[in-house]
Amino acid sequence: METFLIIINIILLSITLFLITNWIGAHSLSYGYISMTLFVQRDNSPAYNIIFRILSPVIFIIIVSSIYYFAGMDEIVKNIWFITPVYLLIRFMVNIFLNKWLLLDKKREVIISIISIGISYIVYKKFIILKNNLLPDPANLTGELWIIIILYLYSTFNNIDVGTSGSEKRRDIYYSKYYNMFKEQYHDIISSSNPSPILESLIYSVLMYENFNRPPLIRFFERKVFPRYSKTLGIMQVKTKKNINDRESVVLGSNKIIRSYNKQLPISIEKEKESIENPENHKSLIGINLRASYGVIIEALKDYNKDDNYIQGVMELQEILVKKFYPNVDIIW
């Protein structure tokens, strides 16, 4: 029975650690924390990100062990270092379920995991398991030198530019895989309305962006709790009154984007014509269409989702897809 309680305790605390680290990370962006997105990000605080990922489980098990000792629950502390590998396994599985595996720097993740597990085990054996050694001794000040050294190394390493080449390569693979996969699955639906290349790239951008934020596992649960707890369904997250699958959502989503785009296009072109002195000039007309397309994309996306971050994210992804898969398309971004 004691072993069972220890196992349950480790699993529950591992889940708690996962939730806490995600929350802290989401609220540490200003300090340089790098969250996983569809886009390449330069790691301006490599030391912070590495130390955060390595030491978060270690600090967590120290704090939890101290609480258990203080509460007189010494037996629960047994093998508490297992929280670290279980937590890392949960993170690994979540990234797979959310289709983010391709975006991970796998070598870095393996190294960070090994170091974190190793430190957790050493701390457990040298300090946690010995109750009297867990809390620092105020009379022993010899560790101050090491604190100075650690702060110096942290400051130095944090100013190193680790570059973005690896991240760019992983995301390039991700874009190619999902664009080609979705084109194979949904091209018959999207091409049925004969959209222009700009409009087609916009539809695929919305599709890929929504899929990243609502991967298949999440969509599965959304369909199960519809309509009480979910209002949008499918890979394109469309509002619907009936339970629909991914293909049906692509039909509804792409049609909505096409209608909004085609409705706004003539309005935007007229506005651009009014803003130039000589609308009969051929080069001016080309500029009008390019600027009009940009404005129409914004309006079409506002009609789809009014959130500014959403619009910015989809447009950033569309710019990438256009450059990669639509080389003959020109848009003034």
Image (cartoon, helix red, strand yellow):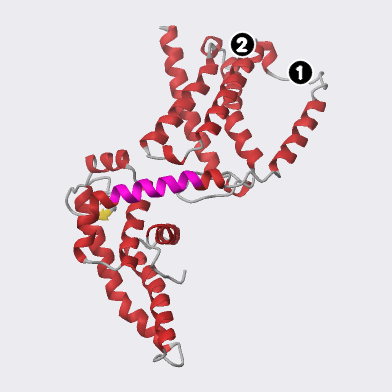
Q: Does the magenta segment cover residue 232?
A: no
Q: Is residue 92 shown above or below 327?
A: above
Looking at the image, which residue is at 79% across and 21% down?
Answer: 138
The Cα–Cα distance between marks 2 and 1, rounded to whole angstroms, is 16 Å
The residue type indicated by label 2 comes to Ile
Q: Residue furthest top?
A: 1
Foreground pick, 143 / 64: 143
Lower sequence index among marks 2 and 1: 2
Q: Please state which of residues 305 and 331 is positioned toward the viewer in this rendering.
A: 331
Which of 108/309 is in front? 108
Place of residue 193 in the rendered image (x, y in percent of width and height, measured from the top left)? 20, 65
Q: Is residue 14 visible?
A: no
Can residue 156 be seen here? The reply is yes
Q: 247 or 226: nearer the eye? A: 247
User: Depth-wise, is mark 2 or mark 1 nearer the camera?
Assistant: 2
Amino acid identity at mark 1:
Asp
Query: Any magenta on residue 171?
Result: yes
The residue identified by callout 2 is: 129
Is the residue 47 above or below the residue 133 in the image? below
Q: How far across and how far down the image is residue 124, in percent? A: 61, 15
Q: In terms of image quadrants, where is residue 320?
A: bottom left
Give the residue displayed 42% in from the left and 90% down from the top. Answer: 281
Residue neighbourhood size for the residue with mark 2, other residues' Cα within 10 Å, grouped as few (<14), some (14–19), many (≥20): some
Q: Is residue 185 above or below residue 268?
A: above
Q: At numbered mark 1, what does the secondary structure look like: helix, strand or loop? A: loop
- Residue bounds of the magenta highlight: 169-182
Q: Position of residue 162 (x, y in %)?
A: 63, 43
Query: Number of callouts in the render?
Result: 2
Please give the residue where the numbered disc 1 appears in the rendered image. Answer: 137
Residue drawn 31% across the image and 60% down it: 203
- Provide residue 178's location: percent of width, then percent of height: 35, 47
